[in-house]
Image (cartoon, helix red, strand yellow):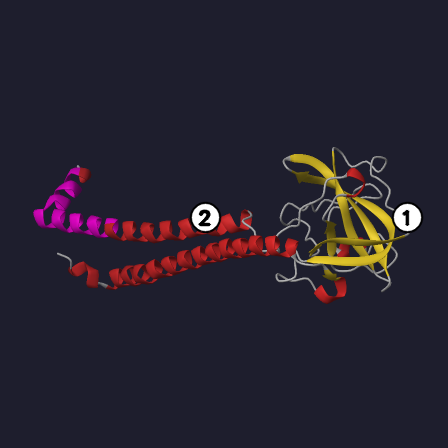
């Protein structure tokens, strides 16, 4: 009764099922592995952040370029504050507000973006405290340049003068007349009564939307594998029922009734 499985048509169906099932299982396992790796990276980054807060700050140039290892490390830099910009639409503790970003002109000739703090409400230059005058030394957590459209960073343009959507050298180089470090620092203590902005986890280490997308894809691939198995058994069952009907002559009888 099951000899139909050896026909050319069923050879194709069988080969497809035999290849599709392990492929789906492999892809599901791979996506699950990526999610587990993100969880481990998130745990490692959290442990590093706690350790970095207890370490003595190191000079900025010793920690560049920023990578997963140096992101979040305590750093220090000396210079004079220059241009000040606002970063709108930034949430902190569930409240909407904006960052106050001031460029610190260092002895190297480059400017270091320094987030001096966060304020609630709409971005308003009149409410943002002016930076301290004269030479200052800042201490805070080193951060990598942001990528617009990633991890909640706005990618919208057309902002008013004195505002920018992302803290990145690529964005700031078009606003300020001097070179900018491909990094930024968030102060450990908010300046002039502002709330300090916590350091972010390095890119691709946090449990963000991408991480949970990997988990969702895991479930989808395993569902696909189950669907292939279900459809194979369903097709086999239909073929067996058709063969039984043919043996009993039911198929010919149905054709005769239909013709009448």
Q: Which mark is residue 35?
A: none
Residue named by callout 2: 216
Residue lying farthest to the left in this orientation: 248
Q: Is residue 179 visible?
A: yes
Camera-near label (2 vs 1) is 1
Where residue 168 sits in the image (x, y, percent)?
A: 74, 54
Image quarter for residue 9?
Answer: bottom left
Q: Is residue 64 visible?
A: no
Where residue 164 sits in the image (x, y, percent)?
A: 78, 46
Q: Earlier in the sequence, mark 2 or mark 1?
A: 1
In terms of depth relative to the viewer, which is nearer, 10 or 40?
40
Q: Residues within 10 Å of mark 1 (few under 14, many from 20)?
A: few
Quadrant of the image containing the N terminus: bottom left
Task: Tell me: 15 left or right of 113.
Answer: left
Secondary structure, mark 2, is helix
Residue named by callout 1: 133
Q: Which residues are magenta?
A: 234-257
Q: Residues within 10 Å of mark 2 (few under 14, many from 20)?
A: some
In terms of depth relative to the viewer, which is nearer, 140 or 83?
140
Task: Tell me: 82 left or right of 221.
Answer: right
Where residue 215 sits in the image (x, y, percent)?
A: 46, 50
Against 200, residue 195 (above or below) is: above
């Amino acid at each position: 009764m099951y000899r139909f499985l050896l026909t050319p048509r069923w050879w194709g169906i069988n080969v497809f099922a035999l290849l599709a099932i392990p492929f789906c299982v492999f892809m599901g396992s791979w996506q699950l592995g990526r999610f587990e790796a993100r969880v481990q990276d998130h745990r490692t980054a959290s442990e590093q952040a706690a350790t970095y807060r207890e370490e003595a700050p190191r000079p900025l140039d010793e920690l560049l370029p920023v990578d997963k290892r140096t992101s979040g490390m305590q750093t220090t830099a000396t210079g004079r504050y220059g241009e000040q910009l606002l970063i709108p639409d930034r949430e902190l503790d569930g409240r909407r507000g904006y960052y106050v970003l001031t460029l610190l002109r260092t002895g190297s000739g480059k400017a270091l973006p320094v987030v001096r703090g966060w304020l609630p409400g709409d971005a308003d230059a009149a409410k943002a405290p002016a930076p301290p005058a004269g030479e200052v030394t800042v201490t805070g957590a080193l951060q990598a340049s942001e990528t617009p459209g990633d991890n909640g960073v706005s990618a919208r343009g057309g902002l008013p003068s004195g505002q920018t959507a992302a803290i990145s050298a690529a964005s700031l180089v078009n606003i300020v007349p001097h070179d900018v470090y491909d990094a930024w620092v968030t102060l450990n203590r908010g300046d002039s009564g502002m709330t300090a902005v916590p350091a972010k986890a390095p890119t691709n280490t946090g449990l963000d939307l991408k991480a949970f997308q990997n988990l969702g894809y895991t479930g989808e691939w395993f569902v696909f594998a189950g669907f292939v198995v279900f459809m194979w058994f369903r097709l086999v069952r239909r073929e067996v029922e058709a063969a039984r009907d043919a043996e009993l002559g039911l198929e010919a009888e149905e054709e005769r009734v239909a013709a009448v």
